[in-house]
Image: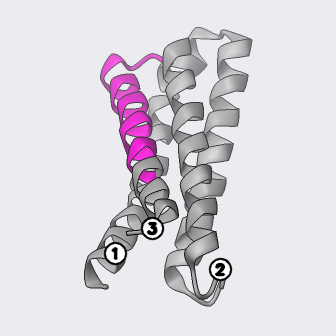
Amino acid sequence: MSEILILSIVTINLALLFYSIGVWSERYSKYLKKWHLVTFWIGFSFDVTGTLAMHFISDRPFDFTDSHTLTGQIALWLMLAHASWATYVIRKNKTELRKSFHRYSIFVWLIWLIPYIGGALLGFGG
């Protein structure tokens, strides 16, 4: 197994770990906290790193006719929008926004799981 493949596997799984911790802890607390925001950005950073690593080992990098590439890009942009919106909400520090934010987080997390699971299945399939 190549080093770049190991890097992509490790970083994508770290993205899942950090993003899931942030999303689910925020959902259970029903209040967006600063540390949730940090986990969103860390998860996003690991996802970008893993995606770039996969780009270098792919036979068809960033081929948007490929469903995995397309869903992965949609998920990345949603993660970026989600973390950016969370940053805005934290900076505004309005209680009502911080209490309702978890509704958006779970949606983005579920969309993110589509390319994560698809990539895992592609990896297992050969």
Where, quadrant-wise, is the N terminus in this rendering? bottom left
Q: Residue at x 68, y 44 (%)?
A: 81
Amino acid of disc 2? Pro
Q: Which residue is mark 2?
A: 61
Q: Which residues are magenta?
A: 12-33
- Asked where in the image residue 44 lies, by quadrant, the reply is top right
User: Taking 63 as reference, is 47 above or below it?
Assistant: above
Relative image position of residue 112 (x, y in whole percent): 46, 56
Q: Residue furthest front?
A: 2
Image position, residue 83 (x, y; %): 63, 35
The residue at which mark 3 appears reads as 2
Residue occupied by mark 1:
123
In the rendering, at what x and y percent does residue 79 appear?
59, 47
The quarter of the picture where residue 25 lies is top left
Cα–Cα span, label 1 and label 3: 13 Å
Q: Position of residue 114 (x, y in %)?
A: 40, 66
Q: Secondary structure at mark 2?
A: loop
Find out whether residue 19 is within the magenta segment: yes
